[in-house]
Image: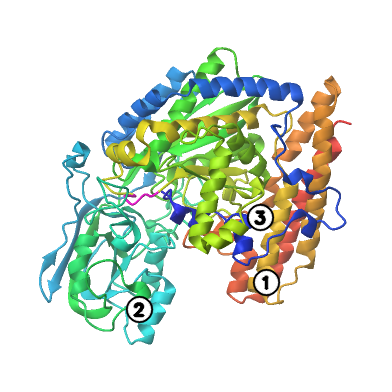
Amino acid sequence: MIRATAVRRAALFAVPAAALVMLGVAVPTVSGTTRGVVGSSASYQTAGDSLRGFSTASADRERALEALLAQRVNRDSTGAAFRVLTAEPHPAGSARNKVLADWVAEKYRAAGLEDVKLHRYDVYLPWPREVSVTMTAPTRYVATMKEDVVAADPDTKQDPGITYLGMTASGDVTGELVYASSGNPGDYDWLEAHGVSVKDKIVLVRYSVPYSYRGYKALVAQQRGAKALLIYSDPQEDGYRKGLTFPDGPYGPLSHIQRGSITYDFIVPGDPLTPGWASVDGAKRIPIAEARSAPTIMMAPISARDAAPLLEALTGPVAPASWQGALPFTYRVGAGPATVHVKIDMDGATRPIWVVEGRIKGSEEPDKYVVLGNHRDAWVFGGVDPSSGSATQLEMARVLGGLAKEGRRPRRSIVFASWDAEEWHLTGSTEWGEQFADDLRKNGIAYINVDGSTSGSNLQVGTVASLNHLVVETARDVTDPASGGSLLAAWGKSLAGEQAATIGGGASRTNAVRNTLDYPGNALGSGSDYTVFLNFLGLPVIEMSFGGPYGVYHSIYDDYYWMTHVGDPGFRYMATMADVWGRMALRLANADVYPFDFQLYASRVGGFIDAFARQTSNGRVALTAVRAAQRRWLTAGARLEAAQHAALAASPSAARTAALAAMNEALRQVEQQLLFVDGIPGRPWFKHALYAPKSTYAAMTLPGMREAADDKHWPLANAQALALAGRLDAAAAMVERAVAAAPR
């Protein structure tokens, strides 16, 4: 669902700390937040070639195993799987996607995975019977709602079916047209200030930079009283203004259309009829009219080519300069004289979806497991999103399964999951997570998500800060296929390039990211399958991809041709992601001590608190208890660093083994301490005290406190501050338990 570009990164991941400094945002350092605290900044550096969480002997065994992984990852087999996955359109609920589910299950079995099974969930998944957009005045124009066939790409000759947006309402309406730029609240405010009302109008908006989820645009238009909403991709954002267009380059031609869902899954994800519980046989189902995540507005996607006659027919005020796009005329806002008729007929059906699960059982602690997930369903062919990730996962399963068959099993289990209906409100992963919630909370170690693995060569990672070390050390040990050097070094160069583009070359030269532990982003929004694991279950998560210019998102052109000619010729980065993903899984599964860094995590949370105090509360929220709890967690994290080193240096014995097991069990539970039992106010499904998505999918930190403060509901904000302090204290107490359990 989420697009693998800088747009996606801006929506979902925090900007690296050094970049924030360059933007004038204060970022805490160890020395700045640990005055009087045990420990030093040494733990914040990635030392030499060490493996966090491993004794010297264990690290040697791990490196030998990872060398075999790297040797066996094969571009040809990755590419062969990718071709099968992208051969035909396979949206959620389709016969083709069920064929692929069965095929993935067979690939899992052939790789040596055990307990391979398909989980069926019957979910609300309406398909269109008719979608049409027609300008009836001042002239008649019927939107084609189709993308052009490209002679060089035979796959584009296939019919993808009716073009639509998932979860749109049905209806038949006619009204004057208004252009509302990106369809954000400020855009409607500008229109109102200039005498243009959108009530009972048809509104035309565009996909935008910075990225704003289309479902958020639907909600805002619904709240403003619009009859229907149309959305298109302006060539300013992802077309010819950016560079060469398909088939000659990465950007979208004028006919490309971005499909997608408009579900309000920032309120509650998953099947709208089973909010908070799994849609299994016999499950209670609420009426769709009661579903908080179901839009009541009609919305349809069109191409820039179809939008042009509609925009050109508008009169009224000239749109502001920031609203002007790349089409060859002056954009005006209306209302009218363009009048548009929109007809949408959805079938309101419930359809089966299929989650494929398989596992490599651990040799010592088989009940504990790491989950590796990617979704399988696509709006059309899904070249980047998600088939590149699916092919990567299958290659990783082939190699790790082969090692297990040879007797090289991980200590703990590794679970592979191929999700379905991710494009529809993250459905498959959410239903699976809700169904197996008790076991995941009891035994889950972490979740690593790869949606689209590859649209370029720039590594992009978002994670909770406790896993920054794991991410950075893995990148250090993987070879970048373009440079032949370390992937970590290539990552640093790409981040410097982002900073140069955002801030200016001079600033980037003098303020380069110096600490590699700042490379991963540490604030997570939503938009992909990690959501249920972090926000509902309290598991640490990693979300990653290789990104690059990608202007064909959710269109017919996101296919095999685009990937093999533009995105990843030779499948170099698709295969590299299998190496990265596999190493991360093995390190979590094999570590003597789980490689979490709670000192860094607590430090990052200190930054969240500082930002809240500076930007939001205006002194009206008492933060004394929150800061005291954060300092306690930070102190415990610093002591844990020493305890981990001592534990790894201790001589092998039965007592050491028992102590490490107790220590690990406490460490595994720390993230779960950050969950509110009743969730955040107004969105009880979202339970994490530190993270929740905004309506735009962008990251929101300290969401309970922040949303109350944004609403100027100061009593609630103060109550949420006390609740947050309680969760931070609980996390600190669990880290203290781990320290107490450590072998001496």
Residue sitting nearer the eye, 463 or 90 = 463
Q: Is residue 9 above or below residue 307?
A: above
Classed neighbour count for the residue bearing mark 1: other residues with Cα under 10 Å, few (<14), some (14–19), many (≥20): few
Our reading of the magenta stretch's main secondary structure is loop
Give the residue drawn at x 27%, y 76%. 178
Amino acid of disc 3? Phe
**Residue 693 horizontal side relative to residue 347, left or right:** right
Separation of residues labelled 3 and 2 (CA atoms): 44 Å
Whether 86 is among the magenta residues is no
**Residue 709 horizontal side relative to residue 198, left or right:** right
Q: Position of residue 386 (x, y in %)?
A: 39, 40
Classed neighbour count for the residue bearing mark 3: other residues with Cα under 10 Å, few (<14), some (14–19), many (≥20): many
Amino acid of disc 2? Pro
Which-is-in-front pick, marks 1 and 3?
1
Q: Which residue is mark 1?
A: 614
Quarter-wise, where is residue 297 in the image? bottom left
Give the residue drawn at x 75%, y 39%. 666
From which residue to which does the magenta span run?
549-553
Q: Are marks 2 and 1 in contact (CB under 8 Å)?
A: no
Give the residue drawn at x 71%, y 73%. 621
Q: Position of residue 106 (x, y in %)?
A: 39, 22
N-term-proximal mark, 2 vs 1: 2
Q: Is residue 648 above or below residue 487?
A: above
Q: Which residue is mark 3?
A: 676
Q: Which residue is mark 2?
A: 320
Quarter-wise, where is residue 441 in the image? top right
Q: Position of residue 445 (x, y in %)?
A: 64, 36
Q: Are marks 3 and 2 in contact (CB under 8 Å)?
A: no
N-term-proximal mark, 3 vs 2: 2
Can residue 368 be seen here? no
N-term-proximal mark, 1 vs 3: 1
